[in-house]
Amino acid sequence: MVKPDTLFSLLSKKGLTFYTGVPCSIFKDLIICLNKNQKVQHVRATSEGEAVGLAAGYFLATKKIPIVYMQNSGLGNAVNPLTSLADREVYSIPMLLFISWRGEPGVKDEPQHKKIGRVMLSLLTVLEIPYQVVDPGRVEKQIDALLLKAKKQQRPVALIFKEDQIDKLEGTGGQKEAGFTREEALEIILEKIGRDVIVSTTGKTSREIFEIREKRHQSHEQDFLMVGSMGCALSTGLAIKLNTKK
């Protein structure tokens, strides 16, 4: 496994100090390192495509290579700016993509990750984005090789992280925020909403709503739990609202 603080120090020594992206649980402890350090610029994005745009702006202003982190489920959101902005046939903007490999073939995962996990490497090949899958014992050499290619060829490159390849930081688990957990907050919200239709975003929010309903022996009939499609809960809920009679 790669220790997140060691990886962070390694990247800093190579002059990589700009990070942007949309988080994945695989990168959780690396992101904690970013948030603790004042010497790096960490700009959180609302979508992977926006993150590529932020990275492009950073390079245009500084001529330095940015890091864009994302879950592979969000790679589709980044295809347009990767091909129409950063690509060598357009503006030739180098960047190092950190992509988590959810849904890796042969590894148990959530159903929404199966398709992208199976096609991700082929998609990167079609996009002509050079990539390497992390080998924890060779990660520095892999980063050096990708950075060299990004600089010489002026193009995006990608480093793929599998599940459990980034170690956990000590003393970062089990802490409550704002005095209560997310699940406790959801219990309060569900009480207030009553019988209205609920569209919940992918990930832990949907899982915990399901668990709360089970614990209370309540029906799931009014809940639409989004599977994948991060960022689409609002638009899905809006269309349901616009086309549902009271």
Image (cartoon, helix red, strand yellow):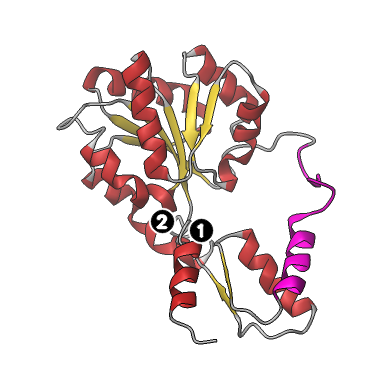
Where residue 177 appears, as percent x and y from the top left, is: 78, 45
The residue most toward the right is: 179
Where residue 91 appears, as percent x and y from the top left, is: 20, 27
Secondary structure of the residue carrying tag 1 is: loop
Q: Which residues are magenta?
A: 172-193
Where residue 50 appears, as percent x and y from the top left, is: 39, 40
On the rendered structure, is 140 left or right of 155?
right
On the rendered structure, is 24 left or right of 114?
right
Q: Which mark is residue 117?
A: 2
Where residue 3 appears, as percent x and y from the top left, is: 63, 30
Observer-nearest residue: 145 or 181? 181
Question: In this picture, is 5 found above or below 126?
Answer: above
Front of the two marks 2 and 1: 2
Question: In this picture, is 101 found above or below 188?
Answer: above
- Real-space Cα distance between discs 2 and 1? 10 Å
Question: In this picture, is 13 found above or below 79?
Answer: above
Task: Identify the image quadrant of the N terminus.
Answer: top right
Estimate how packed mark 2 is, as few (under 14), some (14 to 19) or many (20 or more) residues with alpha carbons within 10 Å: many
Observer-nearest residue: 94 or 185? 185
On the rendered structure, is 29 left or right of 202?
right
Instruction: Report the amino acid beneath label 2.
Output: Gly
Q: Earlier in the sequence, mark 2 or mark 1?
A: 1
User: Are the residues flagged by discs 2 and 1 in contact, CB closer than 8 Å?
Assistant: yes
Task: Identify the image quadrant of the C terminus.
Answer: bottom right
Determine the image quadrant of residue 198: bottom right
Q: Which residue is mark 1?
A: 107
Residue drawn at (60%, 33%), measured in percent from left and top?
A: 30
State yes or no: residue 184 in magenta: yes
Instruction: Report the amino acid beneath label 1.
Output: Val
Residue drawn at (62%, 66%), measured in percent from left and top?
A: 206
Determine the image quadrant of residue 175: top right
Determine the image quadrant of residue 98: top left
